[in-house]
Image (cartoon, rainbow, N blue to C red):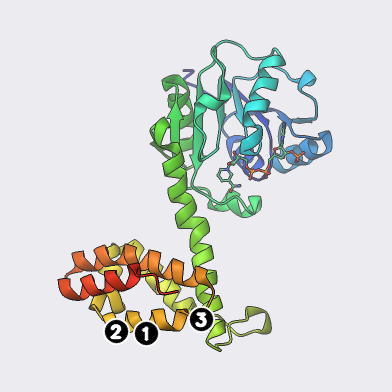
Amino acid sequence: MPSNLSTLTLSCIGAGRLGKTLCRLFSDTVSIGQIINSSTASAQLAAGFIGAGQGQGDYAELQPADIWLIATPDDSIQLASEALKNAGVLRKGDTVFHCSGSLSAEVLGLDNCPTASVHPIHSFADPEKSIKRFAGTACGIEGDPDAVALLDTLFRHIGAEPFAIASEHKSLYHAATVLTCNYLVSLLELGKQMLTAAGVETNNQTGASNPLEPLIRQTVDNYLSTDAVSALTGPIARGDSRTIEAHLRALQNQPDLWQQVYCALGNATVPISAKQGQASADDLHSISALLQSDRK
Ligand SMILES: NC(=O)c1ccc[n+]([C@@H]2O[C@H](COP(=O)([O-])OP(=O)(O)OC[C@H]3O[C@@H](n4cnc5c(N)ncnc54)[C@H](OP(=O)(O)O)[C@@H]3O)[C@@H](O)[C@H]2O)c1
């Protein structure tokens, strides 16, 4: 591995939200070579955002580079890697990596180059904001040792905190990030829909704030600053089985999904309450029975 990153060139295939953000951050450490997107116009816009590199729209125009980032949508990574291989610019030992959360480096299918995947646990919805907020981002990394060593160093230069993830566990690891990030949004939205059904005004667009907001912030803050056992409050923590029974009755005339989610998450809450020790074993047993019974 070269000791001086500044002598290296990095080119990017797929400079969208993640690709152009990382390239701009990398541009202080390595030289940015070429940017290739589906269209030349899009690649040139991305190069403008990065402030370095030449935007291209055709693999035939590619030049050699020491590091290749393939940041196309997941479903196109394999094809992009194949197109890169067929372009004839890859040299033995060039590093190729992608940033998918669920795919391993194997998908790149390159025998003569060290390959890796580096998945930043970060939402790149707004690249300008991501530039400012990227420092401190944890990144799951796996692949060939040489690629992992080089990319670990490169990502630490832009403030990331890489950690090793086993290749065979990438899908489970990614499912965890989806559950925690994307599905948390869905859970908050279901809670808001239930409040609306209960006649509570929750429409932000009319200026009314979501009355759950302070509770959401306190709960996430308590969980992050302590742990699940310390953060859990509410009827399952207290062992109030009659309250749970009343909730299930209220949910009977509502969409099936609400009761399914309520029961699934209630089942996940019982063992946390058991560890906390406030509710009796009998109460928790009754609550489990209620949550598992098919009430529809
Ligand atoms: N976005 C996130 O928050 C996030 C977080 C972690 C990991 N990731 C991973 O990062 C990767 C990119 O995601 P993204 O959200 O940045 O995607 P994106 O915003 O949709 O950008 C994809 C880019 O790839 C280009 N592209 C598509 N097919 C191509 C091809 N065959 N050859 C060359 N360029 C091609 C597109 O070009 P055009 O502009 O011309 O259409 C676009 O610029 C994915 O592997 C994703 O799993 C994303």
Taking the image in four quarters, ligand 1 sits in the one at: top right
Position of the C terminus, as image quadrant, is bottom left
Q: Label 2: which residue?
A: 242
Mark nearest the camera among 2 and 3 is 3
Residue 277: give x, y in percent of width and height: 16, 70
Front residue of 3 and 192: 192
Q: Residue 246 carries which label?
A: 1
Q: Do the residues under discs 1 and 2 have CB atoms within 8 angstroms?
A: yes
Q: Disc 2 and disc 3: Cα gap in Å?
A: 18 Å
Answer with mark 1 or mark 3, whichever residue precedes in sequence: 1
Apparent side of residue 133 relative to residue 42 in the rendered image (left or right):
left
What residue is rendered at 67% in x and 84% in y? 206
- Give the labeled residue for mark 3: 253
- At a point 49% along the width and 51% down the height, the residue shown is 178
Instruction: Residue 230 in the image: state x and y as whole percent.
Output: 25, 68
Give, as a three-letter code, the residue at label 3.
Asn
